[in-house]
Image: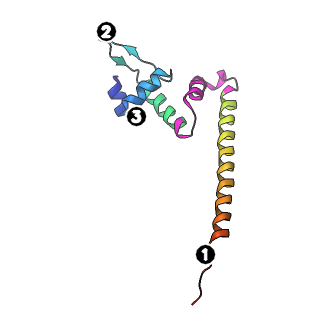
Amino acid sequence: MRIGELADATGVSTRSLRYYEEQGLIRSARTPGGWRDFDSSMVERVVMIQHLFAAGVCSATIYELLPCLEAPPEERTGVLEQLLAEQVERLEAKRRDLDRELDILRALRNETALPSHVS
């Protein structure tokens, strides 16, 4: 399938697909005319990449995760679980930071609120 067909099948722009290919996240063969030719298995892979990006995972980590995700369970070495655990911890730390920042802003808002007038 050509890059436009992959873009249509996944809802991902051709620009993003070129970036994914540049980063080694997806692969294509080249036709004699120089066109990219993607295997149909790339549709599922692009969807997985989109999910990982949506979870805040960077392309370098996605590059590490993809072979683990595609390996049969009996061939997995624990690397996948460790990488995913690290990503969960990263997001939990981010959530703790956001909760702390929200608490500070709420306290400041309460301290600086104008007194309400009772009629």
The first of marks 1 and 3 along the sequence is 3
Q: Which quadrant does the C terminus fall into?
A: bottom right
Circles 1 and 2: CB atoms closer than 8 Å? no
Residue position for label 1: 114
Q: Position of residue 107 (x, y in %)?
A: 68, 64
The first of marks 1 and 2 along the sequence is 2
7 left or right, relative to 83: left
**Does dot 3 land on a helix, a strand or a loop?**
loop
Name the image colouring.
rainbow
Q: CA distance from mark 2 to mark 3?
A: 25 Å
Could you tell me which residue is drawn at 48 percent across and 28 percent down?
45
Q: Which quadrant does the N terminus fall into?
A: top left
The reply to whether the magenta stretch includes residue 70 is: yes
**Does dot 2 land on a helix, a strand or a loop?**
loop
> Depth check: 36 or 45 in front?
36
Residue position for label 3: 12
The region drawn magenta spans 53-79
Amino acid at dot 3: Val
| Mark whose residue sits in front, 1 or 2 | 1
Amino acid at dot 1: Leu
Q: Position of residue 58 (x, y in %)?
A: 57, 32
Could you tell me which residue is drawn at 61 percent across and 75 percent down?
114
Q: Position of residue 19 (x, y in %)?
A: 45, 26
